[in-house]
Amino acid sequence: MTIINVTLPFGVIKDISDYSRFINKILKYDISFNILKFSTGSSGINLLLDIPEGKIKTITESLKKNNIIVNKKGRVIIDDDKCIDCGACISLCPTDALHFNSEDRLEFSYEKCIGCLLCLDSCPRYAIEEM
Ligand code: SF4
Ligand code: SF4
């Protein structure tokens, strides 16, 4: 399974029946997936979806065709000057983009980050910033 971060713009989602329609659009591909996070942002409803790795292309194309925004990867940066390597952010990261290296220093793997922002508020030093 792999995780994607999507936004259902308010113009697309007007009420709860639209939300069901969106889910059914994915389910018609007979795909099982998990919704890891559901939140409302300034531009729409944000969903963190855990989907089968082999179906990423099919699902993202279907979402884009239906005006759903598939958010770009790599949406945080770590300020190394502020980070004290406490590790508080690590357990929140669903993709292992945040981890310790062999010297117990925080390491950020940009290519693994899906921009879910779950880590953003975890840092006591405000070292994690949204890009
Ligand atoms: S935004 Fe933070 S928690 Fe989410 S994948 Fe990127 S590093 Fe991990
Ligand atoms: S929570 Fe902040 S200070 Fe702690 S390891 Fe993560 S980025 Fe560094």
Image (spheres, rainbow, N blue to C red):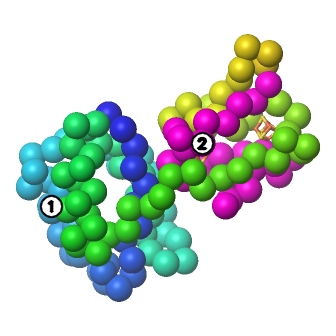
**Label 1 secondary element:** helix
**Cα–Cα span, label 1 and label 2:** 32 Å
Quadrant where the C terminus sits is: bottom right
What residue is rendered at 15% in x and 61% in y? Answer: 24
The span shown in magenta is 105-131
What residue is rendered at 56% in x and 31% in y? Answer: 96
- Give the numbered dot on residue 61: none
Residue reaching furthest to the right:
81
Question: 10 Å neighbourhood of mark 2: few (<14), some, or many (≥20)?
Answer: some
Residue 45 in percent (x, y) is at 42, 69
In magenta stretch: residue 108: yes
Visible in this render: residue 116?
no
- The picture quadrant for ligand 1 comes to top right
Q: Specify which label sits upstream in the sequence, 1 or 2.
A: 1
What residue is rendered at 35% in x and 85% in y? Answer: 11
Q: Amino acid at mark 1?
A: Asn
Q: Amino acid at mark 2?
A: Tyr
In magenta stretch: residue 71: no
Q: Quadrant of residue 109?
A: top right
Residue reaching furthest to the top:
102
Residue at mark 2:
110
Q: Is residue 64 above or below residue 90?
A: below
Residue at mark 1:
24
What residue is rendered at 83% in x and 51% in y? Answer: 126
